[in-house]
Amino acid sequence: MEWPVIVGSVPGQASAFQPRSALREQVNAAWAGGGTVVLSGGGGVGKSQFASSYAHQAADEKVELRVWVHAAAADQVVAAYARAALRVQASGADGQDAEADARGFLEWLATTTRTWLVILDNIIDPDEISPWWPPVRGSGRVLATTRLREAALSGGGRAVVPVDTYTPAEAHNYLATRLTDEGMAHLLDHHTERLVETLGRLPLALSYAGAYIINEAVSCTEYLQDFTNRRARLDELLPADADTEGYGRQVAASLLVSLDAAQAREPVGLAAPALRLAAHLDPAGHPCALWATEAVTTYLADHRAVRTGTEDRKPARDEVQAVDSRQARSAMRLLHRYSLLTDDTTDSPRAVRIHALTALATQEILPTDAAPAIAEAAAGALLALWPEADHTAPGLAAALRANTDTLATCTDDLITTPGGRALLFRAGNSLLHAGLYAAGVSHWQAVALDGERVLGPEHPDTFTARNSLAVSYSHAGLFHEAIRIGEQVVADCECLLDPDHLNTLYARMNLGASYQYADRNNDGITLLEQVAADSGRILGPEHPDTLSVRANLATSYRHADRLPEAIDLQEQVLADSERILPLRHPNTLSVRASLATSYQHAGRNNDAITLLEQVAADSGRILGPEHPDTLSVRANLATSYRHADRLPEAIDLQEQVLADSERILPPGHPAILYRRAGLATSYRHADRNLDAITLLEQVAADSERAFGPHHPDTHAADRWLAECLLEAGRAQLPSDPQGAWNYARRVVKWARPRVKKYPEVCASLLRAAYLLAADAFDADGRPAAAADYRRRAAGQA
């Protein structure tokens, strides 16, 4: 005999192979405690490729016998063992009886002193394989792969090592190496990381994506756009000619194989409808509690497959059997065992996850009439889980919003059913409560358009959607859009609905708030006074929405310099809120913060600071430190510190708040402009004029872009900048001629285009700048230039 002996075809090493050092350490440690390791993980996580790396390593280490077995069925294992028995000349092996030869091979493994490695790839039925596990003796090792998570796999001294997807670093390294090796590194771009995450860091998906990108010469961004198009199909995203690593079409094919097996296990007939429901939810996860909701158990009962011969069919009405939460949970665990989804058995809001490719493949094989029932069940279940107040469970609310987005993407016109509309409205309001204003605008734009298209422009729910869109525009600082849509909605409601209809009332409430945000105080006060009276009559004087209207009215009084009325009304509203609502309810926090701001405007800084420090702490704890309302409270607290001559504290807090605002809020949001201006004011008080000018230049430019050249806030920003430029000009010293000259140019560049708009301010600015430039030229020994600039200064006077 000639050694080494190789039996079976070992897959070639993958391009850009990732060694997966952490996983390798686990396998090596398990082997140190025994000779058999089982790699368990879902399809496409790279189990076979990883196992093949050990086969190649064994070749490098001169292991004398290497056997690769396709272990999907027992007869395949027996046939491979029988061939091996003949190759190693096992006692009694003659090629006449495959099972006898296979047993002879196992005996040979148990007694040989030669080194060996047996790899059993893709075990599907552990019971079938049970008699054929190789014995572990001294120099021998066994490595098996399976998609199953069966307890039987860990018996007999075997160690089960879970295999998950690549780590973020491994996934990125794979794709980067793959493209770089082909000379196409330029196709990597700023969406590479997002593409890697969208593909779930699944080795199978990344191998297809890499091959496709190379073959088609498309960027990562272009491939990501194709993949996230819900109408794209697996055959387009994972074409057969992109299977360069020999994975095979595992996603759809293995899905069908596993699903058929799961359907036949207890609880019989529930695996398929359960997987179809999960495929319409967020791949990143949903709460396990979803499977205990009445909407889901009813759906499973109605769609539990009935076996007829070799085919499944939907049950007739008299065949429907009730499904309880325990059976629904068992169906989910069954899918977990077959690696069709992952259940981490915790109460996490994302405890149950499904891979994006598994979800897509499931949707492709979905029966044509199944989608409406799935959408109805999923919508009902998500709504049933939604907390009454988002701030009590922010993680759960975030997960439910993500699942709503996925369901809406997977379902045509979710808005058609009352349950679907209720879910979309709940998710949209949740975005606004969470301070995700840009996302809220996008959400409500889509819902409003779908409402007009599907329900019609006069449907009450269409009015609600358009009204919510106006609110989202206000929160996002798009006041002109908010007022335009708000006025349309109010006019339509007053024309088509009863004057006391709730849609009409809420539309007028929100329009009044938009007037307030846009500094149209007279319009806002007139409307809000009417709405406060109507709300008290229709909803009751202690209804939370009535309290909100009165709070908005008080804020409008403050904006209109009617401070005594504002404070008196806010103190009333706060007393009512603390009596009616929980002490730390977001509405109560908002009223307390608004009252503190009024105290600040009235010069009652100590009262303002005491109240704002309490509200800032409560808001950070209840809403989160980065919630827009928390940022507003902290910004107001910093202003109160400045008014109280606590400048270092004010500046430190304002710098933190501005940095958080710029990171969290959409660019150009009015709150960012106001916070820059507030920080600039503090810089001026601290004699940091140049720092103040840098901020105010941004504020002036952004204000003109956001509000227009004639808006009061734009004029205010220009005035603040002009005053700051004058103060800084007086502080410039001729001992730094270059600095003085650069500063003078900066002033002239700003002031010249604005001479007609602010003639007196700009004339003073230009005169100061020209004199500063003249001093700079004098200091630089250039008297002629200095004289020229003094003549220009005289001309401005």
Image (spheres, grey):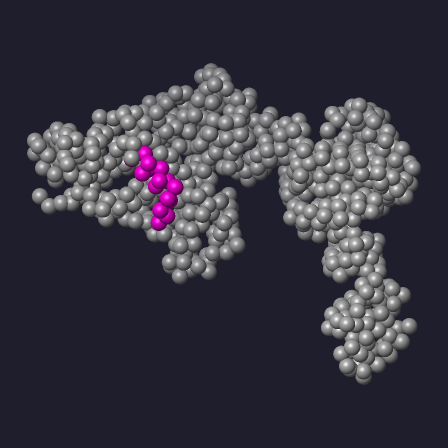
* Residue farthest toward the bottom in the current orientation of the protein: 784
Residue in the picture at 37% in, 44% down: 21
Looking at the image, which is closer to me, 412 or 539? 539
Measured from the top left, where is residue 698 in percent x and y? 73, 58
At a point 29% along the width and 45% down the height, the residue shown is 53
Q: Main secondary structure of the magenta part?
A: helix
Q: Quadrant of residue 762?
A: bottom right
Q: Does any portion of residue 482 appear in the rendered image?
A: no
Q: Nearer the viewer, residue 11 or 635?
A: 635
Q: Residue at x 70, y 46 (%)?
A: 657
Asked if the magenta segment contains residue 27, the reply would be: yes
The magenta stretch is: 17-31
> Taking 363 as reference, is 345 above or below it?
above
Residue 328: image location, x then y, percent: 47, 22
Q: Is residue 132 left or right of residue 644?
A: left
Residue 284 colored in magenta in the image: no
Query: At which x and y percent is residue 719?
Result: 84, 58
Q: Position of residue 641 (x, y in %)?
A: 79, 44
Name the quadrant containing residue 105. top left
- Relative to residue 442, is residue 550 depicted above or below? above
Q: Is residue 168 left or right of residue 470?
A: left
Q: Residue at x 82, y 26 (%)?
A: 576
Q: Is residue 277 left or right of residue 89?
A: right
The image quadrant where one finds the N terminus is: top left
Residue 139 appears in the figure = yes
